[in-house]
């Protein structure tokens, strides 16, 4: 079929998309106010910016996890913003603990935070954190096990890769309930770490499809559009006040945008790749409260956010 590209008006009512056209639904506001109880805020090892929004998000998520040295950043955030450390205690700190300051680690231990060491160098602190989050919600008696152990024994978890071992037992479950994870940091700073974060969006789609993973930066909300059709919903006022441009980015292999409905520039049967330079960047949502995206293979989408406005909205 011939490829097409249509420029739409800035405002477009999108109706009549049958449910048979899409397998997935994503609500943008859920990233900032998750609607179901299984949700985790993951703090990675970069400076915590957006203080106003961060403080709002802290109370929206069921558990909070620091990946190793991210605990230093959380501690410093409290100092910089003159807020009480006791109001910002994570549930877990996990990693090989080569980055966390010893005094800060001790501070959080004394406050009852589970500081879990995992020495394996065959996975990153990000992966250890993701597996820990899965264990928290879905491993039988995981929380009871931690509470009945102590830090001297690493809470009864094998030092090398105990979290991964527990996680592996959960994978035998046929289907796990959805789990929202919002990561702060990871898409900034060192380029190799940024690329690693992007690869995790692809990897988790295959290994842990129950996880809805989002990265939040000062400028963007970044996640993956899986194949088989996505209906992307958002409140009309949220779109108008909080959202700017967006881009559909073929970071992996060359692929094809099968169809979009509700973007400023809608395309169909549109080959896209980094190598060819055919990339749907600097696009935006025209759909009043939704848009439809269908891609042949998973693609990264970035949605520009107005962080100060979002902080007032959530």
Image (cartoon, grey):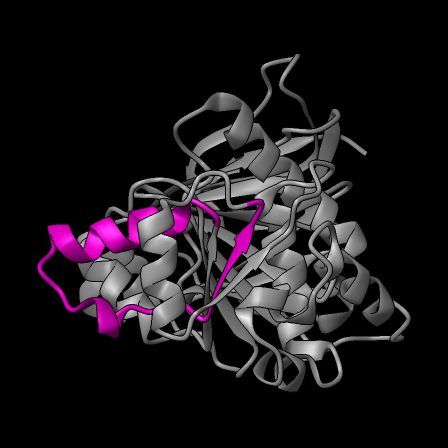
Q: Is residue 232 rendered to the left or right of residue 72?
A: right
Magenta stretch, residue numbers: 68-96
Q: Which quarter of the figure has residue 156?
A: bottom right
Using the image, determine if residue 289 lies above or below residue 200: below
Using the image, determine if residue 124 lies above or below residue 294: above
Using the image, determine if residue 59 lies above or below residue 238: below
Q: Position of residue 173 (x, y in %)?
A: 87, 75
**Which residue: 53% across, 30% down?**
193
Q: Position of residue 135 (x, y in %)?
A: 68, 70
- Is 311 within the magenta? no
**Which residue: 67% across, 68% down?**
134
User: Where the C terminus falls, by quadrant?
Assistant: bottom left
Q: Position of residue 214 (x, y in %)?
A: 51, 54
User: Where the N terminus falls, by quadrant?
Assistant: top right
- Is 85 within the magenta? yes
Q: Is residue 51 rendered to the left or right of residue 197?
A: left
Q: Which quarter of the figure has residue 111?
A: bottom left
Q: Position of residue 267 (x, y in %)?
A: 61, 38
Q: Is residue 76 rendered to the left or right of residue 179?
A: left
Residue 235 visible to the viewer? no
């Amino acid at each position: 079929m011939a490829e097409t590209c249509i420029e739409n008006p800035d405002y477009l009512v999108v109706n009549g998309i049958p449910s048979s056209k899409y397998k997935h639904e994503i609500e943008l506001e859920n990233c900032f106010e998750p609607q179901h109880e299984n949700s985790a805020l993951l703090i990675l090892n970069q400076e915590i910016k957006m203080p106003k929004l961060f403080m709002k998000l802290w109370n929206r998520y069921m558990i909070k996890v620091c990946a190793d040295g991210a605990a230093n950043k959380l501690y410093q955030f409290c100092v910089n913003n003159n807020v009480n450390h006791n109001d910002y205690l994570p549930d877990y700190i996990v990693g090989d603990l080569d980055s966390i300051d010893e005094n800060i680690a001790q501070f959080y231990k004394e406050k009852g935070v589970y500081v879990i060491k995992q020495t394996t160098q065959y996975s990153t602190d990000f992966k250890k954190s993701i597996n820990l989050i899965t264990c928290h919600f879905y491993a039988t008696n995981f929380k009871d096990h931690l509470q009945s152990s102590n830090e001297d024994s690493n809470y009864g978890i094998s030092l090398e890769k105990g979290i991964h071992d527990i996680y592996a037992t959960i994978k035998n479950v046929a289907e796990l309930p959805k789990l929202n994870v919002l990561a702060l940091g990871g898409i900034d700073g060192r380029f190799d770490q940024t690329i690693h974060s992007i690869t995790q969006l692809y990897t988790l789609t295959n290994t842990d499809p129950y996880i809805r993973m989002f990265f939040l930066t000062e400028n963007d909300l970044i996640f993956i559009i899986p194949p088989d059709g996505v209906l992307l919903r958002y409140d009309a006022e949220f779109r108008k006040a909080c959202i700017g441009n967006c881009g559909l980015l073929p970071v992996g292999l060359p692929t094809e945008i099968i169809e979009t409905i509700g973007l400023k520039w809608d395309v169909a049967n549109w080959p896209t790749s980094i190598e060819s330079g055919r990339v749907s960047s600097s696009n935006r949502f025209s759909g009043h409260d939704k848009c439809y995206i269908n891609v042949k293979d998973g693609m990264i989408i970035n949605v520009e956010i107005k962080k100060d406005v979002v902080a007032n909205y959530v």
